[in-house]
């Protein structure tokens, strides 16, 4: 009996002690501090907001001319080199004209021969007409002399054509610049043989004007709908990482490119290059300005993701929480353009100076701690 009575009293004492400890923990300052939210906020302000489309492209001259040759031969003179400035009609190179000159002499001799044959045919035709008038020869002999005269005239015309062709080819041995500009590339050296068979070999590439450049960019089909002519463009190049260059959209080419099921369009951007520091072939990192606001109420987009603990509001709803007297008040909001970090407030009750909640740092810590405890429990259980 005494042992049973003692056991009951010990059990009662333990229960009372557990209740006291639980009550103390529940109302303790540490407990209150743990449960009290610690909000990280940002104050709304007005400012400039820009929507951009980012793309990469290559800088190219607006006019790039490939200078080739229409005849084959050995290059025996070279008058220009890389980066040389040339004028329209300036001689760039010369191809050995020996074979062309030989063909030209042969054509001249052939023309002289046919002209002599024509002169003889003319005399024979004149005699035939005179003899036929006196009935000294038959009509068939007259016809033969007339036909011989026609053949002689045709041979002369053919010889004249061959002579013109060889004269033209003689002119092609001198390679001239078709435009004024800068030699971007040179593909031949003195003594090199060029063969113009089915395709015209390129000897020089000339940029007409490096002060006017263009960027050929590849813009994805999801973004190209927002691109318009004359939109402003900002871009950088690796050669000048701290400098921002500008341009304007000139053209959206309709010919699309499909690579690994991704459809892109070539957007051509005009660029002014007065100092000629932008060089052909440079990679440009382009930002096309789609929309721009100078005095927008800027809402951090992170505020749209925050939801207080226990809130049942859908994360897809356009709701943010304003901090007022330590409490989170739900506010509806309409968003306009966005730059990926901030959105333009175009509707709702928010105003400049309001503090919107981005996160509850205590909730994040608690969630991380709970996740860690669950993980430890799984490990111990395993």
Image (cartoon, rainbow, N blue to C red):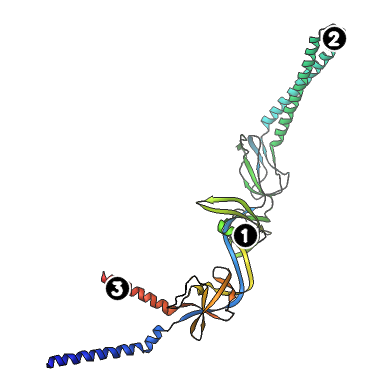
- The disc, 2 or 1, on the residue closer to the chain's N-terminal end is 2
Asked whether disc 3 touches disc 1, contact meaning CB atoms under 8 Å apart, the reply is no
Position of 68 relative to 223 (above/below): above
Position of 87 relative to 36 (above/below): above
The label on residue 298 is: none
Relative to 1, is 191 on the left or the right? right
Q: Quadrant of residue 375?
A: bottom left
The residue that appears at 29% across and 71% down in the rendered structure is 378
Task: State the residue position of label 1.
Answer: 227
The residue that appears at 13% across and 91% down in the rendered structure is 3
Nearer to us of marks 2 and 3 is 3
Nearer to us of marks 2 and 1 is 1
Question: Residue farthest to the top?
Answer: 136
Nearest the viewer among 164 and 108 is 164
Nearest the viewer among 362 and 205 is 362
Task: State the residue position of label 3.
Answer: 377
Nearest the viewer among 92 and 52 is 52
Residue 320 location (% of width, % of height): 52, 76
| Label 2: few (<14), some (14–19) or many (≥20) C-alpha neighbours in 10 Å | some
SS at mark 1? loop
Relative to 325, is 168 on the left or the right? right
Q: Quadrant of residue 222?
A: bottom right
The residue that appears at 65% across and 50% down in the rendered structure is 83
- The disc, 3 or 1, on the residue closer to the chain's N-terminal end is 1
Task: State the residue position of label 2.
Answer: 132
Residue 197 location (% of width, % of height): 61, 34
Residue 73 location (% of width, % of height): 63, 34
- The disc, 2 or 3, on the residue closer to the chain's N-terminal end is 2
Q: CA distance from mark 2 to mark 3?
A: 130 Å
């Amino acid at each position: 009996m005494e042992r049973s009575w003692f056991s009951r009293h010990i059990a009662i004492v333990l229960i009372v002690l557990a209740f006291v400890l639980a009550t103390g923990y529940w109302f303790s300052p540490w407990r209150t501090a743990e449960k009290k939210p610690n909000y990280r906020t940002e104050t709304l302000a007005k400012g400039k907001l820009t929507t951009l489309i980012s793309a990469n492209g290559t800088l190219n001259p607006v006019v790039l001319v490939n200078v080739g040759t229409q005849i084959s031969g050995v290059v025996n003179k070279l008058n220009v080199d890389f980066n040389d400035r040339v004028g329209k009609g300036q001689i760039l190179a010369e191809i050995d004209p020996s074979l062309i000159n030989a063909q030209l002499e042969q054509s001249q001799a052939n023309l002289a021969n046919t002209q002599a044959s024509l002169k003889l045919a003319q005399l024979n035709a004149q005699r035939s007409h005179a003899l036929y008038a006196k009935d000294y020869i038959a009509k068939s002999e007259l016809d033969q002399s007339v036909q011989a005269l026609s053949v002689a005239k045709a041979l002369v015309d053919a010889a004249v054509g061959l002579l013109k062709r060889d004269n033209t080819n003689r002119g092609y041995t001198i390679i001239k610049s078709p435009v004024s500009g800068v030699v971007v590339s040179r593909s031949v050296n003195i003594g090199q043989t060029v063969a113009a068979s089915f395709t015209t070999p390129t000897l020089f590439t000339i940029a007409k004007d490096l002060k006017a450049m263009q960027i050929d960019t590849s813009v994805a089909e999801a973004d190209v709908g927002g691109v318009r002519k004359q939109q402003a463009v900002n871009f950088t190049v690796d050669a000048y990482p701290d400098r921002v260059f500008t341009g304007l959209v000139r053209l959206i080419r309709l010919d699309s490119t499909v690579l690994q099921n991704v459809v892109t369009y070539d957007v051509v951007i005009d660029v002014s290059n007065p100092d000629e520091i932008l060089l052909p072939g440079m990679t440009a990192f382009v930002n096309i300005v789609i929309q721009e606001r100078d005095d927008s109420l800027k809402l951090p987009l992170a505020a749209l993701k925050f939801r207080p603990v226990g809130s049942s509001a859908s994360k897809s709803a356009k709701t943010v929480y304003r901090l007022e007297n330590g409490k989170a008040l739900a506010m509806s909001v309409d968003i306009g353009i966005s730059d990926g970090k901030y959105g333009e407030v175009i509707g709702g009750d928010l105003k400049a100076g309001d503090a919107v909640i981005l996160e509850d740092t205590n909730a994040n810590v608690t969630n991380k701690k709970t996740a860690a405890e669950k993980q430890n429990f799984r490990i111990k259980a395993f």
